Amino acid sequence: MGASSSNLNLTEPSSSNLNLTDAACAVHLFKINGYSATKAMAETDSLPSKRLAVGGYEWEIHYTPSLVVCDYYYVAFKLVLLGAPRWHDVKATLRCRLIDDASRIGSVENQLSHAFKHAEESSEWLQCRRRSALEWSSIFKDDSFTVECTITVITDTEQLPGTATATHALPRHAGSQSLCHDLGELLRKGTGSDVTLVVSGESFAAHKAILASRSPVFMAQFFGHMKEARLHRVEIKDMEAAVFRAMLRFIYTDMVPELDQPEDGVIMAQHLLAAADMYGIDRLKLMCEDRLCDGTDVETAATALGLAEQHGCSKLKARCLELIAANLDAVIETEGYKHLMESSPLVMNDLIRAVRRRKN
């Protein structure tokens, strides 16, 4: 099955190749339009991208929405080397993550590595997302979605003929060029901290300037006219220590590994959504909303709807209303639904409209 511009569009690369002493890296954005049409592809079919030049070789990334794993269909990608290796195996890594076009916030990143020995060789398929989960997610819009694909090609410069050894090599310590790693270490060690935050009896050493740069609430507390500006110890109430720890890690590193957990990730997303809204951390709030859109089911739909209503999450609200309308009898039996009717009775009007739309 050949590639068609109506089904698979490649945008201009969002970043150029980065040539280091032993690696080349390029990031490309793929927008797959007409997704519904591609679902008819057989498991053995795939759609190739245009040729991508990385690390002195040409590559293609192939897409399929029909990879079957444990009786489920997955959207998947694989990397194909178009030319033969010139000297030794070509080692390459493919990383993929689904992203929102507007916010560029992505879902969980997946990756695979492969040593290519000859031309037209391909890697294994990289499972990106179950089809059903993709179709329910907030990044799926107008029958299309966007994937950020990163190709990293490793070359052993000592083995290449005519390659001189660099006199001044860049430092190779793990994480030495990672800002989020370094800030994470700063948080972990507490070096230079100027405030202690106490949450549910647990103390966290932090830095006022970093907190304020990421949260308008912390900015007002520490650099405004609030009393906390003069304090070196601040107690935060109505929040669990584990939730605050996750939020604090995000403030420093822009990462929330807790959201990646298959089951506990949904529960953490519920708590973190409220915390992010409380402290005005919009990016974290959007990430939690996206996680809940993907992970909410019949049992948790009413609870998630209550959160969406309380914290102004329009995407999550729409997803929950649609899910509840399709499974109303089952949702009514949940504890979350009973609590929703007690705490947010006005949401019933939206729910009735959703049920009517579904019947029509």
Image: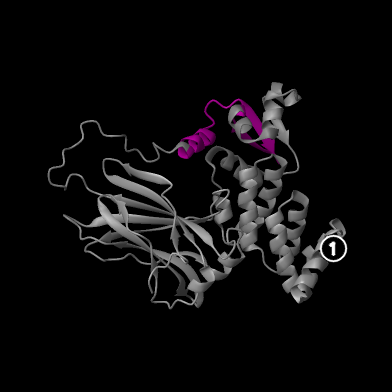
Residue 229 picture quarter: top right
Q: Is residue 36 left or right of residue 119?
A: right
Name the residue nearer the viewer: 289 or 83: 83
- Residue at the location (66% across, 63% down)? 296
- Residue at the location (68% across, 54% down)? 270
Does the magenta segment cover residue 178? no
Q: Is residue 351 left or right of residue 251?
A: right
Amino acid at circle 1: Asn
Quadrant of the image for the N terminus?
bottom left
Query: Where residue 14 sits in the image (x, y, percent)?
Result: 43, 47
Tell me if residue 327 can be seen.
Answer: no
Name the residue nearer the viewer: 74 or 187: 74
Q: Is disc 1 surrounded by few (<14), some (14 to 19) or many (20+) residues within 10 Å?
A: few
- Residue at the location (35% across, 47% down)? 25
Q: Residue furthest left?
A: 162
- Residue at the location (75% across, 59% down)? 305
Residue 11 picture quarter: bottom left
Name the residue nearer the viewer: 168 or 10: 10
Tell me if residue 166 can be seen.
Answer: yes
Q: Is residue 31 left or right of residue 125?
A: right
Query: Where residue 83 sits in the image (x, y, percent)?
Result: 23, 60
Magenta part of the chain: 180-208
Quadrant of the image for the C terminus?
bottom right
Q: Secondary structure at mark 1?
A: helix
Query: Where residue 271 sits in the image (x, y, percent)?
Result: 69, 51
Residue ID for mark 1: 349
State whether residue 43 is above or below residue 128.
below
Query: Where residue 282 sits in the image (x, y, percent)?
Result: 65, 43
